[in-house]
Image: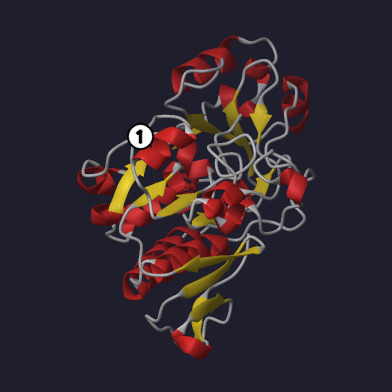
């Protein structure tokens, strides 16, 4: 399921002996452009001898961060797309070769001669993915995994829709931006991007108070639907508008449930992922709505009777810069329906 999703901090650079640097979570520490640079990432040190010039990003979330940092000219490949690229990044994205719509082979990645590889999910950059990080390290290619897929998760839960030990926080997305900006030596751009996202988040979340509103997030599958649990990207969205997720009592990111359970909890509104992929029933928005309005159980849902559907992209439900898009879309819909207080 999912194509995606996780938690923590803020990052900066600390000068070490020998003119090397290491990233820490002390946001007050001044940064430098000294190399080699060491980043503490998901339990391992990533050592970068110089700002990458031939980067490959293996997931859409990572790609959109690099493009937002103005790094298209230093990218030689992207892969594993779930949705069209964000509209404001289309022209930059067109400059970068797409190695594969889904996971590319290791050979295809190596043919691009990368000097750096990044990914959003351990299922892409790890066992069963393109390659694990040790393989890239042995080949002399530094790799970076989004902290949203390791912080606050047990090792066996990384990219497996497993339980989170702590809820995802939007600060972890900002940490990823700052890490990548440090690696590419564009820290000022990173801070500008974080500032823009913080402003958007504050504006959208500060405009609504949807206490008393309950939401369910349906990603895909009509038979045993994947509904968001408490603590992933959807948890950030729900909390930002003051609403309640009907599955706030489960720590699994995307548990499979039955429709009777959804009816028992009867959400005020349904957040529906309109997925570009067409791999299982209920990927596309129109198939979701057709199912909801024709099924004998789901047609009795209050949200279906009232046609309270909040449409988001699949990427909006992944921990990335798109999480802010999700916050804005949910907040706007609840406001339009008069379900919030000023």
Indicate whether 191 appears above or below 321: below
Indicate whether 301 appears above or below 234: above
Left or right of residue 212: residue 309: left
> Quick one: 92 or 138, which is closer to the camera?
138
Q: Residues within 10 Å of mark 1 (few under 14, many from 20)?
A: many
Name, please, the residue furthest toward the bottom. Answer: 17
Q: Residue at x 32, y 36 (%)?
A: 98
| Relative image position of residue 242 (x, y in whole percent) | 61, 56
Quadrant in the picture for the N terminus: top right
Indicate whether 135 appears above or below 279: below
Residue 222 in view (yes/no) = yes
Q: Residue at x 35, y 61 (%)?
A: 52
Label 1: state its secondary structure: loop
| Relative image position of residue 296 (x, y in whole percent) | 68, 10
> Quick one: 23 or 215, which is closer to the camera?
23
Q: Residue at x 45, y 47 (%)?
A: 61
Q: Which residue is mark 1?
A: 99
Indicate whether 300 appears above or below 129: above
Q: Residue at x 27, y 43 (%)?
A: 87
Residue 82 in view (yes/no) = no
Q: Give the tally of numbered discs.
A: 1
Left or right of residue 155: residue 173: left
Using the rendered view, name the quadrant where residue 145 is placed: bottom right
| Relative image position of residue 139 (x, y in whole percent) | 50, 51
> Quick one: 119 or 239, which is closer to the camera?
119
| Relative image position of residue 273 (x, y in whole percent) | 50, 32
């Amino acid at each position: 399921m999912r194509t995606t999703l996780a938690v923590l901090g803020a990052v900066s650079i600390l000068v070490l002996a020998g003119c090397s640097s290491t990233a820490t979570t002390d946001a007050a520490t001044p940064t430098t452009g000294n190399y080699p640079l060491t980043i503490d990432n998901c339990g391992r040190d990533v050592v970068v001898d110089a700002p990458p010039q031939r980067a490959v990003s293996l997931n859409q979330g990572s790609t959109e961060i690099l493009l937002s940092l103005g790094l298209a000219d230093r990218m030689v490949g992207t892969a594993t797309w779930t949705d069209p690229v964000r509209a404001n990044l289309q022209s930059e994205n067109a400059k970068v070769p797409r190695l594969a719509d889904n996971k590319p082979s290791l050979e295809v990645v190596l043919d691009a001669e990368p000097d750096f590889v990044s990914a959003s999910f351990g299922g892409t950059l790890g066992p069963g993915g393109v390659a694990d990080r040790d393989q890239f390290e042995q080949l002399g290619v530094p790799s970076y995994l989004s902290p949203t897929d390791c912080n606050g998760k047990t090792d066996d839960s990384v990219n497996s829709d497993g339980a989170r030990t702590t809820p995802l926080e939007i600060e972890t997305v900002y940490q990823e931006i700052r890490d990548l900006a440090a690696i590419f030596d564009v820290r000022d751009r990173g801070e500008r991007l974080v500032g823009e996202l913080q402003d958007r988040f504050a504006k959208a979340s500060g405009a609504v108070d949807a206490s008393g509103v309950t939401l369910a997030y349906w990603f895909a599958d009509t038979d045993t639907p994947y509904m968001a649990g408490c603590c992933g990207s959807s948890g950030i969205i729900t909390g930002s508008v003051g609403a309640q997720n009907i599955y706030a009592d489960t720590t699994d990111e995307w548990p499979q449930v039955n429709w009777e359970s959804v009816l028992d909890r009867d959400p005020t509104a349904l957040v529906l992922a309109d997925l570009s992929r067409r791999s299982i029933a209920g990927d596309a928005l129109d198939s979701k709505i057709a199912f909801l309005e024709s099924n004998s159980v789901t047609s009795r849902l209050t949200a279906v009777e009232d046609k309270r559907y909040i449409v988001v992209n699949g990427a909006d439900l992944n921990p990335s810069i798109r999480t802010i898009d999700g916050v804005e879309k949910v907040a706007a819909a609840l406001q339009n329906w008069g379900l919030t207080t000023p």
